Structures are given as structure tokens and as C-alpha cells.
Image: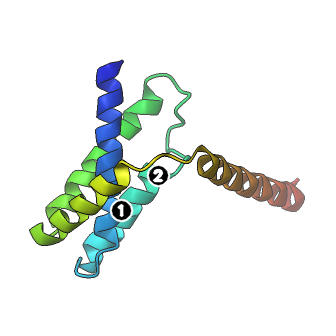
């Protein structure tokens, strides 16, 4: 379990790296769009395969995010990558806000409920 926790912490740090890479002004646009997509997927509480599905739920996180990170970093100039790495290391040492996580999850839930209600009103 300790090894998995360390791997997930490293994955979080890499996702933060991609987030800071995406915000860098010298990053080419194709790499920026990919970096934004990878960071959004990594930090979103919504997955392609929900985490409560045994094995498959974690498999997408353990495959899609690292592959996206690797592709983004391959498209990123070395100097941009190093600047973003320093920012990501500093940000990963900050405390995690559980309140912010709950607010984001509530926003996603409200959005899904609103979409479901609108679909039910229109087609139901």
C-alpha cells in the first residue's frame, strides 16, 4: 500500500508539472492544448471509467495520465519543463484543501443533475 501511495503522489506531482507547463507563455499551442487536456483530466473528479469499478477504475488513471504526461513533456522545451518543475515541487508541498475538493465535486454533481433534469424535461 505504501508503494501505491508513493506512486500516486508522484503522479500528482507530474500532473502539477503539466498544469504549470500548460500555463507557460513560451509553450507551443499544440503542446499547450494537450497539456490543458491532460491536467483537466488528471484533476477532474470525473473519469472515463469511474474509480468504483474494480481494477478498471484505477487502470485508466494509471495509463491515461502517465501517457499524457509523457507526451506533453516530450513536446515541451527543456527550459520550460525545468521552470515548471520548480513550481510543481513548491506547489506539491502545500496542504491539500478538502473543502475545495468537496466544492468542486458538488459543482460537478449539480451540473450533472441539471443536465439530467433538462434531458428529462425535454425527452421525458
Task: Count the labels in the image.
Answer: 2
Circle nearer the N terminus (2, 1): 1
Which residue is pictured at 23% across the width and 79% down the height? 28
- The answer for how far apart the CA atoms under marks 2 and 1 are is 10 Å
| Secondary structure under the numbered disc 1 in the rendered image | helix
Residue 72 percent location from the top left of the image = 24, 61
Above or below for 111 versus 109:
below
Which one is in front, 120 or 77? 77
Identify the residue position indicated by label 1 in the image.
19
Q: How crowded is mark 2: few (under 14 residues within 10 Å), some or many (20 or more)?
A: some
User: Which numbered dot is residue 62?
Assistant: none
Q: Answer with left or right where residue 105 lies relative to residue 77.
A: right
Look at the image and tell me whether residue 26 can be seen. yes
Residue extending farthest left: 78
Cβ atoms at labels 2 and 1 below 8 Å apart: yes
Residue 48 percent location from the top left of the image = 49, 44
Point out the image quarter for the N terminus: top left
Q: Answer with left or right where residue 118 lies relative to residue 79.
A: right
Which residue is pictured at 21% across the width and 52% down the height? 70
Residue 107 percent location from the top left of the image = 69, 56
Q: Answer with left or right where residue 88 lies relative to residue 111.
A: left
Amino acid at each position: 500500500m505504501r508503494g501505491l501511495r508513493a506512486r500516486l503522489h508522484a503522479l500528482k506531482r507530474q500532473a502539477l508539472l503539466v498544469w504549470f507547463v500548460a500555463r507557460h507563455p513560451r509553450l507551443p499551442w499544440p503542446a499547450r492544448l494537450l497539456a490543458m487536456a491532460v491536467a483537466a483530466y488528471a484533476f477532474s473528479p470525473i473519469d472515463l471509467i469511474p474509480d468504483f469499478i474494480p481494477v478498471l477504475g484505477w487502470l485508466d488513471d494509471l495509463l491515461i495520465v502517465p501517457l499524457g504526461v509523457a507526451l506533453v513533456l516530450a513536446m515541451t522545451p527543456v527550459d520550460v519543463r525545468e521552470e515548471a518543475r520548480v513550481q510543481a515541487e513548491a506547489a506539491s508541498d502545500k496542504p491539500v484543501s478538502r473543502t475545495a475538493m468537496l466544492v468542486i465535486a458538488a459543482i460537478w454533481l449539480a451540473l450533472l443533475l441539471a443536465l439530467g433534469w433538462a434531458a428529462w424535461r425535454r425527452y421525458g
